[in-house]
Amino acid sequence: MNLLGGFSVAGGGMLPQLASTIAAAAVSYTMFQHYFPPELAGIIRRYTEKLIAFFNPYIQITFPEYTGDSFERSRAFVDIERYLNSAAIAQAKRLQASVEKDSENVVFSMANCEEVEDYFQGIKIWWNSRITTVSSNRTFSWRSRGQEMEKKSFNLWFHKKHKEIMTTKYLKYVLKEGKEIAVRERRRKLYTNSGDNDWFSFLENHRVWGHVLFNHPSTFETLAMDPEKKQELINDLINFAKSESYYVRIGKAWKRGYLLYGPPGTGKSSIIAAMANLLEYDVYDLELTSVKDNTELRKLLIDTSSKSILVIEDIDCSLDITGDREKKKKKKKKKEEDSKKKKKKKKEHSMNRRGDDDKSKVTLSGLLNIIDGLWSACGGERIIVFTTNHIEKLDPALIRRGRMDKHIELSYCGYEAFRILAKNYLGIELSSSHKLFPRIRTLLEETEMTPADVAENLMRKNSDDDQESCLLRLIEALEESKIKAEEENKRKAEEAANKKEEETDEEEESEETEEEED
C-alpha cells in the first residue's frame, strides 16, 4: 500500500488515460475555487474530508518536530527519528545525510515524503516524513531566519482495528527503543556554563551549557589511589547506577553526593574523570562564580541530563558559602561603613555599583536547594561532586551526610599508589619489582609527596631515560623533599621555642611589676 497517493500502473497504454484524468481533476479543482464562494468551499471541503475519513480504514498520527512555541525539539520526535534511521537506510530510496558535530560519523535519515514500513506483533505499520514550508507572521522567530520556516513531522499510519495496540504498546516500544539507541550511540560530553547566560544568549544557542567531547583517558585502573579505597568507591558507584527501583521505594531522588578533599595534586580531577568513564556519564563542570543568582542556578540544573556528574571544583574558593561566612560578613559590613565615611566621585561610585551588580548572588540556601531540596529531583541518575583543598573551611550544612553522602580523603602518595604509577609510566607490572623499590618505599613513609609530583619524576623526559634513571630521579626528589621537611620542622620548632621563651619572659616581667606595685 502506498500512503503517499501514488498509483500502480501496468502497460504503456495506461499513461495517456492517467494524464487525461489528472488534467480533468486539475480543471475541476480550478473551477471549484473560482466559482464557489470561500465560505461554501470551506463547508464542502470540510464535509468531503469527513466523508473520506468515514470510508478510510486507516488512522494517521502526526509527530511534529516542535510543539507550540517550544524552543526545544519534541522528545518524542527525536526518539522516533533515531528509531526510524535504521529502517530508512534499509528501505528508503532518498536519504538525508549529515555529519555529527565534533565527529566524522555520517548520520542518515528519511528525506521529505519518504516512506518506510515496520512490523509489530505481526501488524504492518507505515511511517513517512513530511516537510512543509509556512510563512511566519511573527516579528521575531528564533527558528526562522527569513520570512519562511520549515516544519518537519513524522506521520504514523495503521489500520483502525489496531488502534489500541498502536497507542498503548507500539508507541511505547518505539520511544523506548529510540532512547536506548541514543544511549548506545551517544558521545559523552564535558559541559560548562558560560558567564553570558542571559535570555538572548539562550534564544540564540538554545542551551545554557556549552560543551566539548569528553575524551579524558583516566580510569580506575590507571588511578594512583589506595587499592581498598578505590575498590570501595567502584562498588559504591556501580551499586548506585543499578539502584533506581531502590530510590523509588525509599522515596528519595536518584542522586548521590561525593566530597573529594585533600592537598592539591592528589588526583581529585582524575577521580571525577574515572567515575565518568566507569559509568559512561556526561560531566557538567559548574562554575559558580559565573552564575548570577539562585534562579539562574536552577535553570542550569533543569538543563542538565540524566546519567551525568555535576561537578563544583574548589568549592571553598567559589563563593561566600564556607564555614567562616559570618566572619566575612562582619568584614564586609565594616568595609561598607568605612566607605560611607569617605567621599567618592560620582563616576567612581557608579563604577563600583556596576561591579557589585556583576558579582554572583548565589546563596548557600540556593545551592543546598539544588543538592538536597525540591529541585534536586529534576532529572534522575545524577552524581554531585564537590572538591576542596580545605575541608575545614566548608559549612557543615553543605557537606553533611545526605547531601555529600560519601567523603573521600585523598592524601599523599603511598607505596601502593606509587606501584600503579610505576606501571603506568615505566611499564613495571604490579606482579614484578625493582631493586630500587625498597628505598622508595622507605622514603615515601618518611616524607610527603603528592601523586602528581611522583608522576612528574617518573615521566620519561627524553629518549635516553630508562626505568632506573627515572626511579633514581624520584629517589633524589624524595630525599630533597625529606631534607626540606626536616629543615621546615626544625625552623617551626625553633620559632615555637622562641615564642614560648618570650611568653615566659613576659610573664616574669609581669610578676615583677606586680611585686613592685605591692
Image: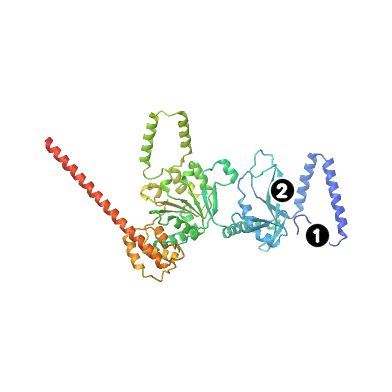
Q: Position of residue 69 (x, y in %)?
A: 63, 43
The answer to which of marks 1 and 2 sits earlier in the sequence is: 1
Q: Which residue is mark 1?
A: 8
Q: Secondary structure at mark 2?
A: strand
Please tell me which residue lies in front, 344 or 467.
467
* Mark 1 to mark 2 CA distance (whole Å): 26 Å
Q: Are marks 1 and 2 in contact (CB under 8 Å)?
A: no
How is colour applied across the structure in the image? rainbow
Q: Residues within 10 Å of mark 1 (few under 14, many from 20)?
A: few
Name the residue rendered at 84%, 52% in the picture: 22
Q: Which residue is mark 2?
A: 132
Q: Position of residue 77 (x, y in %)?
A: 64, 52
Please tell me which residue lies in front, 481 or 423.
481
Q: Horizontally, is 433 left or right of 149 in the view?
A: left
Q: Which quadrant is the N terminus positioned in?
A: bottom right
Q: Horizontally, is 275 left or right of 174 in the view?
A: left
Q: In the rendered image, is residue 232 in sight?
A: no
The image quadrant that residue 101 belongs to is bottom right
Q: Secondary structure at mark 1?
A: loop
Please tell me which residue lies in front, 16 or 144.
144
Q: Which mark is residue 340?
A: none
Amino acid type at circle 2 is Thr
Q: Does 135 appear above or below 53? A: above
Q: In the rendered image, is residue 29 in sight?
A: yes
Q: Nearer the viewer, mark 1 or mark 2?
A: 2
Name the residue rendered at 86%, 62% in the picture: 11
Amino acid type at circle 1 is Ser
